[in-house]
Image (cartoon, grey):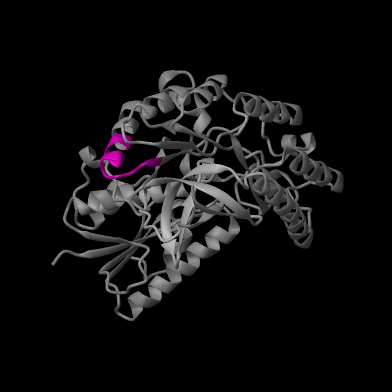
Amino acid sequence: MAKKINIITLGCSKNTVDSEHLAAQLAAMDYKVVFDSDRTDADVVVINTCGFIGDAKQESIDTILRAAQLKEQGKIDELFVVGCLSQRYADELRPELPEVDDFFGVNDWAGIVERLGAKYRTENETKRELSTPSHYAYLKISEGCNWMCGYCAIPLIRGRHKSVPMEALVAEAEALVEKGVREIMVIAQDTTYYGVDIYGERKIAELLERLCRIEKLEWIRLHYAYPTDFPDQLIEVMAREPKICRYLDIPFQHISDNQLSAMKRRHTKAEAVELVNKLRKAIPDIALRTTLLVGYPGESDEDFAELMEFVKTTKFDRLGVFPYSEEEGTYSATRLKDDVADEVKQERVDRIMRLQERVSLENNAKRIGQTMRVIIDRKEGDFYIGRSEYDSPEVDQEIIIDSLGKRLYRGRFYDVQITDCEDYDLFASLA
């Protein structure tokens, strides 16, 4: 019988893609691969870890410890750890976790495949075994980052920006669509920087245009767009191509010039505001998602008040906010004092999210009465759960649909009329 391998993925969607590529290599050698399974009958467990912030690192450690206990109980045969935490802390973890058979870094997929007794095949590098529902998938277009923001450990973990050649990405997307994928989320640490290292200029607009030509692919959405030197060509193609969702994930982190400078963000408040205005002028119905960071060293009450005003006036459709946590080796950890108290950080997180709840409810109320095209993700009880082009899976709000007794199918598109709303959900019936 083929070995069963359970791949547990923690952290961001970029890790999801890595796990799916690993699974394809193993499946090609007749291993039976399951994702994130709670079952203990797998022969091998592979944990793809996150090491980005303190909470994520703790989740990774806790997951490893649970698996180590299962191994001690004889319920699994082998345990391997891969990904960001392993890349950065393998030497420290080995003596502390002797139950782990081996540790592998973020790019050593050949190493773990061979350690599992299989042969790494370059011809399978664009292949994926999906861990997401079959109608959507993530497409990782580059690795690493060149920006070196003051708080961020990603360049230390994953290295400098390295784009995937366009031909390989198009081939990977075409293979996903052949499997039934209808929605692709384009991801990277910075999607707007795509192509600079290979082609000498930003090529994200051209890549999106080529993806738009894939038949049966209906939605393309863009995540993690760095705001500095944002390419005008990207705005133009988003406004022109109907397959590209009117949605953009653009992490601003802060708006105070003092904080932007301290964070080494390389843009100003005026430039951020100008970019928001330019996007909304070119694509009037665009949904903007952002991420904010509060409690960074030196953040004053005045800096935070400026950020609150930015959230209030910009009215982001989607917003996440995190308290600063010191990450060793980063600029802020080595050069700046973590001088904002933890309780102040959390209080600022709570204040922004209370404000965003009001903003989100106001935005959602404007949708009542509108007809929207949705994709169905699943059924819960008597209702179907879908999303519009303004919402990405797993991170954004959903539309709860009364099908009026009709059967709807997962992964298909339907027109619905919005009948009611909450701060982070819409309610609808078939149009």
Magenta residues, as a range?
A: 173-183
Which of these two is toward me, 139 or 315? 315
- Asked whether 182 falls inside the magenta stretch, the response is yes
Q: Vertical placement of 49 versus 412: above or below? A: below
Which of these two is toward me, 288 or 338? 288
Residue 230: where, in percent of width, then height? 59, 25
What residue lies at 67% left-to-right and 42% top-to-bottom? 316
Quadrant of the rendered image containing residue 142: top left
Residue 8: where, in percent of width, then height? 38, 61
Left or right: residue 322 versus residue 245 is right
Quadrant of the rendered image containing residue 424: bottom right
- Asked whether 185 falls inside the magenta stretch, the response is no
What residue lies at 37% left-to-right and 71% top-to-bottom? 38
Residue 44: where, in percent of width, then height? 28, 66
What residue lies at 20% left-to-right and 59% top-to-bottom? 31
If the image is split into quadrants, where does the N terminus sit? bottom left
Left or right: residue 115 versus residue 389 is left
Q: Vertical placement of 281 versus 427: above or below? A: above
Which of these two is toward me, 396 or 65? 396
What residue lies at 48% left-to-right and 60% top-to-bottom? 92
Left or right: residue 268 versus residue 191 is right
Residue 39: where, in percent of width, then height? 33, 73
Q: Vertical placement of 401 versus 67: above or below? A: above
- Which residue of the protein is positioned furthest toward the left in this rendering? 1
Left or right: residue 131 versus residue 278 is left
- Which residue of the protein is positioned furthest toward the right in this rendering? 302
